[in-house]
């Protein structure tokens, strides 16, 4: 069996997507943490964009979180998360791409140093949540209903971070009035793969990092 090594940055939600799937699949893997402010040469040699995650499969490297998820899904001995019919697969991929765009906005929300851009991007994120709410299964608790899917693994890290962002700045109201997204979030945050795929003190580390970057939402974070 191939060895798996996830090259990671401790607070990265894109890395967490891959870690969630590895946890869901019960696969053995190692994690190598790097400092993104001081990227090692060996990392730049395997990550042309200079971004994590990279999954090393023996001596071969795969970058881009959505591609890593698909590789893991195709090579698992457990049940696959992507559906077997091409249209079902296309639909999941399209929402995963949609969610990746929200992840960029969530980072703007966390890192902006002024209130106005944070409020503006919060409004955009709420708009995306409303769109997702129109498309999530009626029955829940997950995207497609009873069964956990690749869309769930893709969004969990960002729902987790935005929930935390709201504890820092409750007036953001990101989930207010969108009960389907709040319920989806609750189901995903209660799932063991979501909690076991992060470093235990993620909030503390993220809080320090954001505070040191003059993040507006982390302005009162106790350092
Ligand atoms: N599209 C990429 C995005 C990954 C990404 O943005 N990773 C961030 C950390 S969360 C990164 O490595 N940033 C380093 C940099 O841009 O220099 C993916 O899905 O894997």
Image (cartoon, rainbow, N blue to C red):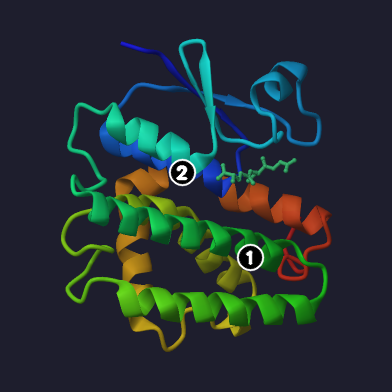
**Dividing the image into 4 quarters, which one contains the C terminus?**
bottom right
Q: Name the disc covering residue 105, or none.
A: 1
| x and y percentages locating residue 142 in the rendered image | 26, 63
Q: Do the numbered discs 2 and 1 sit on residues whose CB atoms are within 8 Å?
A: no
Q: Residue at x 63, y 51 (%)?
A: 204
Q: Quadrant of ligand 1?
A: top right
- Residue 9 position by quadrant: top right
Say whether mark 2 is within 8 Å of ligand 1.
yes
Q: Residue at x 74, y 35 (%)?
A: 36
| x and y percentages locating residue 138 in the rendered image | 20, 76
Instruction: Left or right? Give the position of 93 relative to 33.
Output: left
**Dividing the image into 4 quarters, which one contains the N terminus?**
top left
Vertical side of 178 occupied by 107: above or below: above
Q: In this rendering, which labeled residue sits more in front, label 2 or label 1?
A: 2
Q: Secondary structure at mark 1?
A: helix
**In-front residue for pair 166/142:** 142
Say whether mark 1 is within 8 Å of ligand 1.
no
Instruction: Left or right? Give the position of 190 relative to 69.
Output: left
Instruction: Left or right? Give the position of 19 relative to 102.
Output: left
Mark before the other along the chain sequence, 2 or 1: 2
Say few, some or many: other residues with alpha carbon within 10 Å of mark 2 (under 14 / 14 to 19 / 20 or more): some
Which residue is label 2 attached to?
Answer: 66
């Amino acid at each position: 069996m191939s060895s798996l090594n996830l090259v990671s940055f401790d607070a990265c939600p894109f890395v967490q997507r891959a870690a969630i799937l590895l946890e869901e699949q019960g696969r053995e893997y190692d994690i190598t943490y790097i400092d993104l402010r001081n990227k090692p040469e060996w990392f730049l040699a395997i990550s042309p964009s200079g971004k994590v995650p990279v999954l090393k499969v023996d001596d071969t490297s795969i970058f881009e979180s959505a591609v890593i998820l698909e590789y893991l899904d195709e090579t698992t001995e457990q049940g696959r998360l992507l559906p077997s019919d091409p249209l079902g697969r296309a639909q999941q991929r399209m929402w995963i791409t949609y969610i990746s765009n929200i992840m960029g906005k969530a980072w703007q929300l966390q890192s902006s140093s002024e209130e106005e851009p944070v409020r503006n991007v919060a409004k955009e994120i709420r708009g995306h949540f409303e769109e997702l709410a129109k498309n999530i299964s009626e029955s829940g608790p997950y995207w497609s209903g009873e069964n956990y899917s690749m869309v769930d693994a893709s969004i969990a890290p960002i729902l987790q971070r935005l929930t935390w962002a709201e504890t820092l700045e409750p007036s953001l109201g990101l989930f207010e009035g969108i009960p389907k997204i709040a319920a989806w979030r609750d189901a995903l945050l209660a799932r063991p793969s979501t909690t076991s795929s992060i470093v235990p003190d993620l909030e503390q580390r993220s809080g320090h990092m954001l505070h040191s970057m003059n993040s507006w939402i982390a302005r009162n974070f106790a350092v």
